[in-house]
Image (cartoon, rainbow, N blue to C red):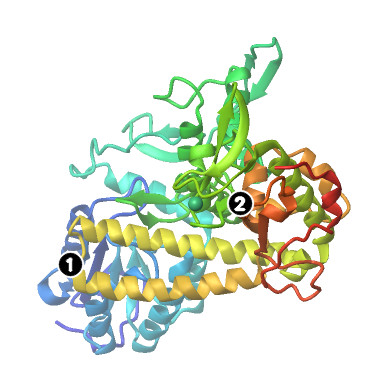
Amino acid sequence: MTKTPGRARYTGDPASLRGLRVGAYARASRAYGEQSVTGQANEAEAWAERHGCVLVGDEVFIDNNLSASRFAQKIRKRFVDLMELVTRGEVDVLWFSELSRSQRRLSVFADLRDVCRERGVLWVIAGRVYDLADPMEGALLGYQAVGSEMEAELISARVRRGKGTAANAGRPAGPKTYGYRRLYDSETRKLVRQEPDTELRTTVGVDGTVVQWSPAGVVAELFAGLKGGKTLSRMARELNDAGIPTPRGARAWTQLVIRRLLLNRAYLGERLHNDQVVATDCWEALVDAEDFWTVHRVLTDPARRKSLPGRGVHLVSYVLKCGVCGGPTGATRKDGEVHTLHCTERGCVGVNYAATEAYVEDVVVQWLTRADELVSLRGAADDRQAVQARAEVERLRSELQGFVAQAAAGKIKSASFAVIASGLEAEIEKAEAAAEAVSVDPVLRGRTGPGAAEAWAGMDVVARRTLLRTVALIEVMPAGGRRRVPVADRLRWTWLLGDPDDGTGSDAEKETGTDSEAGAVLRSA
Ligand SMILES: [Zn+2]
């Protein structure tokens, strides 16, 4: 027996489902506690059989291992196939193991709901039947699509349903992320949920100070610390000094341990598989997205990596460039003291180190003091907008990296990859332009205007180097055969964010002349 196509009504009586055509959809792999695709497919088949329904196409539509992102939708092939059948009126009931509430797919939810409501297609989610023609049911689904409370219920429902599924039993949950704790079902020993570990512990630091801390608190402080300009090594030292135990597997807090922690997207509540985000809002985030991406950007900035040769030692080595060959400059020592800054590649130029450093500091502090207006012109007035724009760039980049990894592993076809990658690259370019237009580098924030000198004094050498690179390209020029040429005459400045004295904020190259106020502090090279 078959019902009139496209006019399914659910009366609350399971018998009324008999004979309906069920389009069942399963997808891997989502949050903790979720069933495998096989588990979902088995459940769909069992449900159809129990209710006397017919599986459309005689099978469950399965998309394996796909991202929930809007880009990945392009390759959710079986989902698209199934939707086409819905549109053609060949489906009476859509069966899902769960309704994902990922924000990025809210529009998909809305489209799908409208198409199904129009055609009278019922939904079955986690075993419950929804009639979209009923406004209450529609609203309920809407809440499910956005609400986090409902998700918790769905997870526990999944855990209950998963109890008998052999495929589910003993599945490794992966290593626990530092800052979280996991709650297990005492009976099934299955993971129920992961939540921030905010329980306070007490330790005694090396100097005898008693410190109260929690792993979740440590994570939050690390993000705030880096964002506030602390260095990785300083934060590592602070944690070690406070006697706070390390994440499992690490002997001490090191720059590397902290760096890895700060780049971990689990702190956004996301779950990754093969470098690809497979689920969002899996658990409570320990950092908001803007802060996370700000920190991410600082840590992955190519300029930061390039600074490694001279890191944290001297202010200007490897920051200044050789004005002849464009190569880096490094400091050499004489009698154990830093003496000369010279072109490391070819030795084209050399200049007195101490004089150069003092002069550069002076000029930059003056620039910062006058740059208040220039910096606010660049959008400091709307910090939030800038950070969001940056975050979007970083998110897209990560997305692309994920696809690169998948393509490299042969998990997506090169043709699909090319389409996705070129689309993403175009988006990244657009997002970068948008970010550039409104953005002020975090390193400049609060460090311009009358308080600039004081702010500079409070910065460590790594932050100062970052700031120097952000605001200026400084080249060491040859002395041209003359002797005792003042440092001011040996340096060529290109203000990357514009020159406040210009009044135009343009990026025009401008050389600093000897008549600048900074000339007062000159020493000979
Ligand atoms: Zn050179």
Quarter of the image where the N terminus is located: bottom left
Q: Which residue is mark 2?
A: 291
As drawn, the residue found furthest toward the top would be 208
**Above or below — where is 220 with respect to 92?**
above
Residue 392 rendering spot, x and y as whole percentages: 52, 65
Is residue 198 in view from this perspective? no
Does residue 246 appear anywhere in the picture? yes
Q: Residue at x 79, y 47 (%)?
A: 362
Looking at the image, which residue is at 31% across and 33% down? Answer: 188
Determine crowd level at label 2: few under 14, some 14-19, many 20+ residues with C-alpha closer than 10 A: some
Identify which residue is drawn at 16% across, 72% down: 55
Q: Is residue 388 left or right of residue 279?
A: right
In which image quadrant can residue 277 be found?
Answer: bottom left
Residue 177 circle label: none
Q: Residues within 10 Å of mark 1 (few under 14, many from 20)?
A: many
**Circle number at residue 60:** 1
Q: Which residue is at the front of the view, 500 or 207?
A: 500
Give the residue type that dot 2 points to: Asp
* Distance Cα–Cα, label 2 vs label 1: 41 Å
Asked if labels 1 and 2 touch by Cβ distance under 8 angstroms, the answer is: no
Vertical placement of 366 versus 10: above or below?
above
Foreground label between 2 and 1:
2
At which x and y percent is residue 379? 72, 68
Please state which of residues 19 and 239 is positioned toward the viewer in this rendering. Answer: 239
Kind of residue at badge 1: Val
Q: Name the quadrant containing residue 512.
A: bottom right
Residue occupying the far right of the picture: 450
2 or 1: tag closer to the N-terminus: 1
